[in-house]
Amino acid sequence: MTNGIATVIRDLTGGSPKRKGKLMPQDRDTGTEANQFGKRMALIVATRLGARKVSSDGNEFELDGKRIAIHSAHKKNTYVAVLYNVLQRVDTVLAALELTVRDEFQVWALDKAFYLSHSKPQIKNPDLAQIATKVFTEHGKLIDKVTDSHS
């Protein structure tokens, strides 16, 4: 791709052109879509597990007397991020990860302390503790499987 075309794409999209193996940057529409997906998946997982919502605008729930944060990631997303202030309030982080078949998610759990010890601040938003999804699958506990029928 020539420099001129790359500059035009960057100006139009607000980021770099798509490169092989990399995702396009998130814009307002895709950010809204991702936010809606995350909230929908959190409710699907919470309903399946019998958790009770404790935050009106976040993904915080109570399950068996413990506070949990429920986050999710599609197959191509290799990271999960949780706000540090949320991590101060929860005991466990759950991640619904789309690993095999489209719209089928495995729900993994990590203890908050383990999550924090393996996370790093996200570059674009240092208020987020980011962790690779493989940390969930290699060190977490698989607790359930769910389907997202709205995708």
Image (spheres, grey):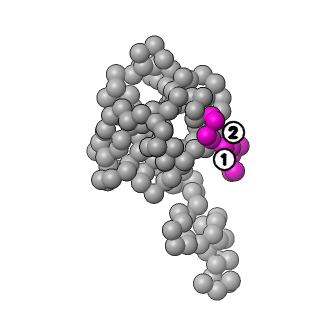
Q: State the image coordinates of residue 80 (x, y, percent, origin top left).
A: 53, 44
Residue receiving disc 2: 127
Numbered range of the magenta stretch: 116-128
Residue at mark 1 = 122
The answer to whether residue 101 is magenta is: no
Question: Residue 119 lies in magenta, yes or no?
Answer: yes
Answer with the quarter of the image where residue 44 lies.
top left
**Residue at position x 45%, y 57% in the image:** 76
Q: Residue furthest top?
A: 65
- Pinpoint residue 58: horizontal percent, then vertical percent: 53, 30
Report which quarter residue 65 is drawn in: top left
Residue 64 on image: x %, y %: 41, 15
The disc placed on residue 137 is none
Q: Residue at x 50, y 32 (%)?
A: 110
Report helix, strand or loop for mark 2. Answer: loop
Q: Nearer the viewer, residue 100 or 4?
A: 100
Task: Work out whether mark 2 precedes mark 1 in sequence or the reverse, and give the earlier one.
Answer: 1
What kind of residue is marked 1? Gln
Give the farthest residue toward the front: 139
Q: Looking at the image, do the residues carrying marks 2 and 1 touch, with CB atoms under 8 Å apart?
A: yes
Residue 74 position within the rendered picture, expressed as x and y whole percent measured from the top left: 43, 51
Residue 28 seen in the current view: yes
118 with respect to 66 (left or right): right
Residue drawn at x 57%, y 44% as measured from the top left = 131
Q: How far, Cα to Cα, is label 2 from label 1?
A: 7 Å
